[in-house]
Amino acid sequence: MNRDGPAPCPARAHPPRVMQLGLQAALAALLLAGACSKAPTVIDGSSQQLFEETTRKARRDLPIRDRLVFDAALHNPGGRRFGGEDANERARQAYHGMTAFDVVADAEARGIH
């Protein structure tokens, strides 16, 4: 004890600094939460059912302006074109493992807009 009275509590000695650190930690947590956005859906072409499910989910990842290009790309996949090939099978093979963003980039590179 000093002659001015009891020694101040260390936590109360610097309350603005403690509050500032708490605020900074809260802001950092919010920034991290915002940066950890959902990963884009990967298209699975291993079966027709999985292809339909994953392309539907992947389409939702896109901004609205890119969805028409995505739809056009699904109906016009790149690759070989022989008379007897099934277009759905060709699309499943062409886009297996890609995201919707990859499909749109591929379509735009092939002139589909």
Image (cartoon, grey):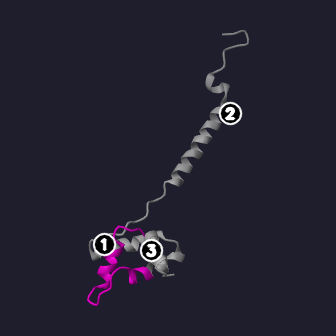
Q: Is residue 25 magenta?
A: no
- Is residue 88 part of the magenta span, yes or no? yes
Depicted 13 relative to depicted 104: above or below: above
User: Residue at the spot x=62%, y=41% of the render?
Assistant: 23
Q: Which segment is the magenta one?
A: 72-99
> Which amino acid type is marked by label 3?
Asp
According to the picture, the residue beneath numbered tag 3 turns out to be 106
Q: What is the x, y in percent for residue 57?
A: 40, 70
Amino acid type assigned to the residue bearing label 1 in the image: Gly
The one of 2 and 47 positioned closer to us in this rendering: 47
Secondary structure beneath label 1: loop
| Residue 28: quadrant of the picture | top right
Q: Is label 3 in a helix, a strand or a loop?
A: helix
Residue 38: x and y, percent? 45, 59
Q: Name the image quarter holding the N terminus.
A: top right
Q: Which residue occupies 73% across, 12% down?
A: 4
Q: Are marks 1 and 2 in contact (CB under 8 Å)?
A: no
In the picture of the structure, the residue carrying the numbered disc 1 is 45
Question: Of label 1 and label 2, which has the lower sequence position?
Answer: 2
Looking at the picture, how far across and down is residue 64, in whole percent? Answer: 52, 75
Q: Earlier in the sequence, mark 1 or mark 3?
A: 1
Give the image location of residue 80, x and y in percent. Answer: 33, 82
**Residue 16 tag number:** 2
Q: Are marks 1 and 3 in contact (CB under 8 Å)?
A: no
In the rendered structure, the answer to whether residue 51 lies left or right of residue 59 reads left
Give the CA distance from mark 1 to mark 2: 57 Å
